[in-house]
Image (cartoon, rainbow, N blue to C red):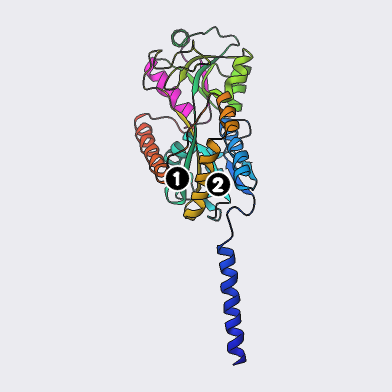
């Protein structure tokens, strides 16, 4: 009888303990956001701005961990292997989370589409087709094309690495324009690309508006076209790339949040709803507006998943049609 009583007490204790754990409110400790680039670029900026608001809304720190390298694979895998409890998230973009899983599928030690789930889109960054002002007097897209035709193989363009969307955008542009340019990949992202341009290692690139704004103001870089749905009111004299004669060229640069697959839906709901709240905070909207960025979260969790699947399908088509050298 004594043994039975002890067994019942033990079982009751386990049941009560399990219930207490199950009822822990998320988040009850700091949350890590893995960013696959060095500090200072668009993905890092997005993560920190949203992280600050999520801290205010959910009452826990959202700590950014920068883990650059391997086309975003290092950061994605760290997130995907983490316990699916909502305490390790990932903010990536069209390069890391739509192109890399297609081009570099064999480099992954995880199954990207099985092990990663889209939580919500966060923001859309317009990009510039941009040139250095150092030793290069190019003021329009036509000027750039004419200069490249007069100097075949001598104009260098920078990108955020082989297979990144700025690489694809420039490859599509050069083919459409009928010019020959050399690719200078820079795996550190926007900060490295800007350095390439400013020091003269490269003359042209596709760069997002947030990362390039300071150097534009300083006169070190010159936007000659914008990749966006329409002209930016802050740059009324800069035409869209479509207006400059290249419709269909260029990528809308999105930022989005991801989590390990099998993260419980109530946790995902909490994160999603908090981001919806964060997106409406005037301070966050103002901070993004200064970067010319559109805050654009997904409508629902289901829409976020469908949207991301469509992005993967789009880039499967693009990468099959536009072949690039992955060994650069």
Residue 114 coordinates in the image, percent (x, y): 43, 51
Identity of the residue drawn at 47% across and 48% down: 116
Pick the quarter of the image with the N terminus.
Answer: bottom right
Residue 91 in which image quadrant: top right
Residue nearer the viewer, 179 or 56: 56
Residue 51 coordinates in the image, percent (x, y): 60, 40
Residue nearer the viewer, 55 or 323: 55
Task: Please give the range of residues in magenta.
Answer: 150-178
Left or right for 206, reference 215: left
| Residue placed under numbered mark 2 in the picture | 89
Residue 17 coordinates in the image, percent (x, y): 60, 70
Identity of the residue drawn at 58% across and 56% down: 25
Q: CA distance from mark 1 to mark 2?
A: 23 Å
Residue 247 coordinates in the image, percent (x, y): 36, 19
Task: Indicate which label's residue lies in the foreground, 1 or 2.
Answer: 2
Left or right for 316, reference 206: left
Disc 2 residue crowd, few under 14, some 14–19, many 20+, Cα 10 Å: many
Left or right for 151, reference 29: left
Is residue 154 shown to the viewer in this render? no
| Residue placed under numbered mark 1 in the picture | 106
Farthest bottom residue?
Answer: 1
Q: How many marks?
A: 2
Residue nearer the viewer, 254 or 178: 254
């Amino acid at each position: 009888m004594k043994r039975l009583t002890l067994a019942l007490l033990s079982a009751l204790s386990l049941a009560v303990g399990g219930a207490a754990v199950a009822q822990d409110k998320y988040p009850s400790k700091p949350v890590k956001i893995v960013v696959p680039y060095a500090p200072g670029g668009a993905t890092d900026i997005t993560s920190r701005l949203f992280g600050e608001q999520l801290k205010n809304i959910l009452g826990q720190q959202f700590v950014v961990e920068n883990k650059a390298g391997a086309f975003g694979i290092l950061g994605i895998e760290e997130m995907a292997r983490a316990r699916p409890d909502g305490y390790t998230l990932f903010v990536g973009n069209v390069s890391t989370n739509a192109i890399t899983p297609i081009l570099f599928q064999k480099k992954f030690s995880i199954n990207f589409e099985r092990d990663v789930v889209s939580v919500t889109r966060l923001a859309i960054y317009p990009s510039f087709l941009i040139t250095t002002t150092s030793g290069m007097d190019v003021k329009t897209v036509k000027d750039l094309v004419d200069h490249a035709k007069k100097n075949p193989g001598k104009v260098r363009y920078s990108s955020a690495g082989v297979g990144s969307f700025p690489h694809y955008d420039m490859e599509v542009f050069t083919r459409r324009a009928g010019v020959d340019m050399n690719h200078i990949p820079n795996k550190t992202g926007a900060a490295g690309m800007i350095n390439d341009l400013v020091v003269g290692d490269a003359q042209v690139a596709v760069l997002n508006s947030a990362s390039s704004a300071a150097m534009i103001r300083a006169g070190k870089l010159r936007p000659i076209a914008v990749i966006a749905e329409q002209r930016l009111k802050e740059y009324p004299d800069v035409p869209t790339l479509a207006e400059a004669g290249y419709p269909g060229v260029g990528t809308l640069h999105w930022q989005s949040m991801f989590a390990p697959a099998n993260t419980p839906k109530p946790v995902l709901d909490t994160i999603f709803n908090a981001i919806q709240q964060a997106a409406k905070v005037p301070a966050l909207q103002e901070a993004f507006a200064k970067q010319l960025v559109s805050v654009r979260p997904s409508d629902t969790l289901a829409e976020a998943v469908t949207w991301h699947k469509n992005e993967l399908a789009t880039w499967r088509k693009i990468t099959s049609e536009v072949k690039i050298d992955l060994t650069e």
